[in-house]
């Protein structure tokens, strides 16, 4: 380890001539030695007046070798260097509810006699200093505000006691979740390894990011919907006819409690993170909602391991003979799905499919409302998308694919969209359809989606049962087409008109949210052309 030292020195006959003498001291440290050993060797350096010899050696070195460049090169590394004083600045931050923040730099490995760490928080400089035993008082006198007497160097004090059992219990909950679902997580990571080994690196990363996006989106949505239900279910008068006073008071109380007792805030964060682990673990193991959160890669079906995606010929039904893609255009109502890119809290979903000019591409105007009356009975009619929102999916028609296969693009990946079955009305037009999407990378099935669609807003139980039977005939139950694996989409009939609860929908319109949603839909559509 090398200790760099510089000092001022009067040279020459004229006493007002000031020059700088500089040099270096090689400090030899064994493993585990730090600032205290540096202090001993510096004292030897001063007492033996080695500093007198160093400038001469330095001058000689600069004349016969490129020492200055050596100093520059070694200064670029933060390994193996030692300093008399180490000053670490973490930067300036603005953080509500926190008055002071201190951190320290350990001296066990740093090799500095004095370490000063600085954080500027809300305009206030917080310094924490510590040094080799016996050196603090002499050095830290220099770190006081002149004229105000306000000490800004503080020693770190450990606060003991408090509600430490709460973070501990939350941490145990997190470990328990990870342990309980560890086989599912291990299986997931093994499949990810296989994807990375066998697929193109970019394709592999795109597929993994696709999975992560939806795996995270579902648990994030749950507390949002829960808080919305709590707010709209809170009793008492409402501010502007919108937010109950009791909900506002509850929020103020929550902020006060979490700001006063950090253990509660920490415990809450750990608990939320733990809940996310449980949620994802359940999705991987197949214990969550099988319809919209079946996250397993190459997951099992009745103890049978189902690997990869099937070929189109393995799942298409005879009804697809002489399939006419032009008849497939138009508005479809989705009645059931097995699809983790969708949410069971959403309802009234529609697909408006149009071919591009020349028939080489297609776009899907996917309409939704949310949340549904069943999932959010207190807040569904107050949502900004209670009257619908749209986003677009795009694809292409590959001439090399069999008729009935569309290439779908979305969220950074492309995968085939198989039209497995169509049923005709008396005029020969398509009235029902079963779609199956499957994303595979490196021999691993990352995603499967199944959609039951009809031209009619309402389907009878008999029609739905017949659709399940045809999907089973196509061999799709192992991919999620069984009744218990699919979600039934709630439907608001066109005859019921728009949702209007009064205050909330009036507020959204006054803010122009409806216009904003329309503009976003146009931008997405234009971007996909």
Image (cartoon, rainbow, N blue to C red):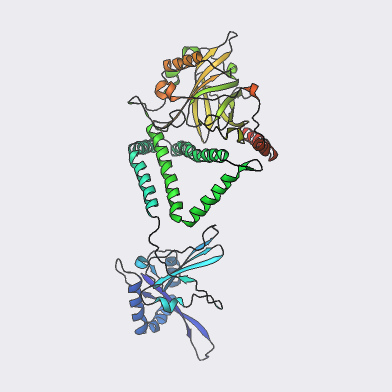
Could you tell me residue 525's position as x and y percent? 63, 32
Residue 288: quadrant of the picture: top left
User: Please, is residue 504 above or below residue 141 in the view?
Assistant: above
Could you tell me residue 521's position as x and y percent? 63, 34
User: Please, is residue 54 above or below residue 378 in the view?
Assistant: below
Residue 28: quadrant of the picture: bottom left
Can residue 161 be seen in this snapshot? Answer: yes
User: Please, is residue 453 above or below residue 124 in the view?
Assistant: above
Residue drawn at x 33%, y 41% is: 179
The N terminus, quarter of image:
bottom left
Instruction: Using residue 446 as the reference point, say whether residue 251 is left or right of it.
Output: right
Q: Nearer the viewer, residue 349 or 274?
A: 274
Could you tell me residue 163's position as x and y percent? 40, 55
Can residue 320 be seen in this snapshot? Answer: no
User: Please, is residue 246 above or below residue 388 in the view?
Assistant: below
Q: Nearer the viewer, residue 497 or 35?
A: 497
Residue 156: quadrant of the picture: bottom left
Residue drawn at x 58%, y 17% is: 456
The C terminus, quarter of image:
top right
Could you tell me residue 118's position as x and y percent? 48, 66
């Amino acid at each position: 380890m090398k200790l760099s030292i510089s000092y001022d020195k009067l040279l020459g006959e004229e006493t007002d001539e000031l020059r700088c003498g500089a040099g270096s001291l090689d400090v030899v440290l064994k493993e585990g030695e730090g600032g205290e050993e540096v202090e001993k060797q510096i004292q030897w350096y001063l007492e033996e007046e080695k500093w007198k010899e160093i400038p001469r050696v330095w001058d000689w070195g600069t004349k016969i070798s490129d020492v200055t460049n050596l100093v520059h090169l070694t200064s670029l590394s933060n390994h193996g260097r030692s300093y008399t004083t180490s000053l670490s600045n973490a930067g300036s931050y603005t953080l509500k509810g926190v008055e002071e923040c201190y951190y320290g730099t350990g001296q066990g490995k740093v090799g500095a006699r004095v370490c000063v760490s600085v954080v500027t928080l809300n305009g206030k400089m917080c310094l924490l200093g510590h040094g080799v035993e016996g050196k603090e008082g002499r050095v830290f006198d220099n770190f006081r505000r002149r004229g105000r007497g306000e000490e800004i160097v503080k020693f770190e004090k450990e606060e003991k006691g408090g509600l430490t059992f709460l973070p501990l219990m939350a941490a145990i909950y997190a470990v328990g979740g990870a342990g309980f679902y560890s086989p599912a997580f291990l299986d997931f990571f093994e499949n990810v390894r296989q994807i990375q080994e066998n697929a193109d690196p970019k394709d592999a990363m795109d597929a993994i990011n696709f999975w992560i996006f939806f795996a995270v989106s579902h648990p994030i949505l749950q507390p949002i919907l829960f808080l919305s239900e709590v707010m709209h279910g809170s009793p008492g008068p409402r501010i502007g006819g919108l937010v109950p006073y009791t909900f506002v008071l509850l929020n103020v109380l929550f902020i006060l409690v979490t700001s006063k007792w950090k253990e509660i805030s920490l415990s809450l964060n750990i608990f939320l993170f733990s809940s996310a682990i449980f949620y994802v673990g359940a999705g991987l193991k197949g214990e969550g909602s099988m319809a919209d959160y079946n996250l397993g890669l190459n997951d099992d079906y009745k103890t049978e391991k189902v690997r990869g995606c099937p070929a189109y010929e393995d799942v298409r039904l005879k009804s697809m003979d002489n399939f006419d893609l032009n008849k497939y255009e138009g508005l479809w109502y989705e009645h059931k799905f097995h699809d983790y890119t969708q949410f069971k809290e959403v309802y009234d979903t529609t697909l408006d499919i149009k071919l591009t000019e020349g028939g080489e591409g297609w776009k899907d105007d996917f309409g939704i409302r949310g949340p549904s009356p069943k999932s959010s009975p207190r807040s569904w009619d107050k949502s900004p998308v209670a009257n619908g929102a749209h986003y677009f999916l795009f694809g292409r028609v590959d001439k090399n694919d069999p008729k009935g296969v569309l290439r779908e693009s979305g969220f950074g990946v492309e995968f085939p969209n198989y039209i497995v079955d169509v049923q005709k009305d008396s005029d020969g037009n398509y009235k029902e359809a079963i779609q199956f999407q499957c994303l595979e990378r490196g021999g691993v099935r990352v995603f499967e989606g199944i959609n039951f669609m009809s031209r009619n807003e309402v389907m009878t139980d008999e029609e739905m049962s017949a659709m399940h039977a045809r999907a089973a005939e196509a061999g799709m139950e192992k991919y999620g087409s069984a009744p218990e694996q699919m979600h039934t989409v709630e439907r608001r009939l066109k005859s019921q008109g728009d949702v209007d609860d009064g205050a909330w929908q009036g507020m959204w319109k006054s803010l122009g949210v409806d216009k904003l949603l329309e503009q976003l839909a146009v931008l997405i559509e234009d971007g996909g052309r």
